[in-house]
Amino acid sequence: MNQPNQLNQVPAPPPPGNPNAVDADEETEEEGLLDEQGRKFVFFNLAPSWLVSLLTHVLLIVLLAVVFMEQKRNSTISFVAADTPGESLEGVDMDLEPLDFDSSALEMKEVPQETEAAPLEANLATLDTQPQDIISELAAGESSMVDSEAMSGAGLTGSTSGEISGRDGDNRSKLLRKYGGTPDSEEAVKLALEWIAKHQMEDGGWNFDHTIGSGDRSRKNPGRMTDARNAATAMALLPFLGAGNTHLNGEYKDTVRRGLSFLLQRARVDSKGLSFYEPSSGTMYSHGLCSIVFCEAYAMTGDKDLGSAAQGCVKFIEWFQDNRGGGWRYDPQQPGDTSIVGWQLMALKSAKQSGLNVRKETLKLATRYLDFASSDSGAFYGYSSPPSADPNYRERAPTSIGLLCRMYLGWDRDHPSLKRGVAWLADEGPVLRSERNPLGVNMYHNYYATQVMKQYGGPEWDKWNNEMRDFLVKSISKEGLERGSWFFDSGNDLGTETGGRLYYTSLCCMTLEVYYRYMPLYDDKASADPFPLD
């Protein structure tokens, strides 16, 4: 997640003039104070008490009179009473034209605070469904008609198909065995979903501080980003979708329905799109995560109301993008960083797969950002600038994110830069606590890198998977209220403090769903879907 800005406190400059003069003044002032105190003591020792009291009161009266008359003479403030009692200020003409400010800079102030649940105001001009209708239908546990035209246009058939078709029961079992999953890894996924469901709040959402809410809850390792409710709820929902649960089907359909309803009640709809942006906490991470949720839920069900919400999410992503450098970051049109770019591109990937409209220009700009933030022709990536040429200072997480984005933007398996990047990731291995990596676990990197290695396949994947899978199966909590969750006290991952146990449990669960969560890109038997993104 994003790091808070540190404000540097600059000492005030010394007063102008000769510093020696300042010291002399201070010395004179100190001597005067001592002399004044000496005279005061003499006065009160020799004079009768009644005389002291009389003179003191006379002096105070004279001083008050002088001050009052001076204030009255210099006053320039006047108040005019209204002609009619109770008259309001509605008719006051306030001319703001001379201020000459750029009103576009204030547009994002309309986004509600994270703790509010602002109602959806209106339907997007490009959407054909009132968002309030989506909420009511989800609350009733019903589905609208499948948007068959969009689904067929994307080459999708059935309730779940395309790149997420592996989440269905039969396909899931086959892919699990084929790509290296085990009964133990599936048991860990099962326990994780149980833990996440138990920590859902009464309003249907989640909080990174998972201790908030009723019922028997784990009290260990809460995250401190309590205002990022949209981000926390999306991270909680993604593992359920990854395991095949929707608001219509699956063991956790009610959990998913309540989570989607919570998000829709907090969404903001205006001319820019449908927004889950949380300006003071989760920022654009929140919107990217929520966009993936709605795009995947639509792709899995064909529910056209969810498709309307997902299309609105895409529109907001496109508006938010830096229209020069092509990236995304914390504020609208701000030069990007690879971390936030990754979540937006994954959302656009899911949107395009499900038949939603994604502007080609958006994807071209994203490619421009990846070109900028990379080195060695795209084999390695930096956070917000090209990485160091020194191999000892390469950045793991940005590189894994950048390579995964390149895969979905059309690089084939034999692309030389992809091969170099994958070879480096494979040589480094997962970032786990070990003698080689004493700082601990970096699940943010592991989550993205596991997807890269799985999509690439081959012996590199087999080695990576054995190490990553077995570590997660072994490290899941098995007792008490923490049973089914993960937490790593790590200096390698910023999510340790901000996201806490919910953050780690979501990432670890999705990492163990990698075998079937997304269909392989380079498998000869993979369906001919509408990829690459470009």
Image: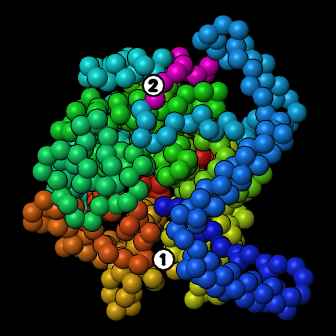
Give x and y (percent) for residue 292. Answer: 45, 43
What amino acid is labelled 1 in the image?
Leu
Judging by the rendered image, the residue that carries numbered circle 2 is 119
> What whole-number distance in Å separates the C-alpha atoms at marks 1 and 2?
45 Å
Judging by the rendered image, the residue that carries numbered circle 1 is 425
Q: Quadrant of residue 451?
A: bottom left
Q: Nearer the viewer, residue 242 or 123?
A: 123
Residue range in magenta is 118-129
Tell me: 463 left or right of 213: right
Q: Which mark is residue 147?
A: none
Give x and y (percent) for residue 317. Answer: 60, 41
Residue 201 visible: yes
Q: Quadrant of residue 119?
A: top left
Q: Nearer the viewer, residue 81 or 152?
A: 81
Tell me: 182 left or right of 276: left
Q: Say whether residue 122 is magenta.
A: yes
Residue 182 visible: no
SS label for mark 2: loop
SS label for mark 1: helix
Residue located at (36% from left, 76% from top): 490
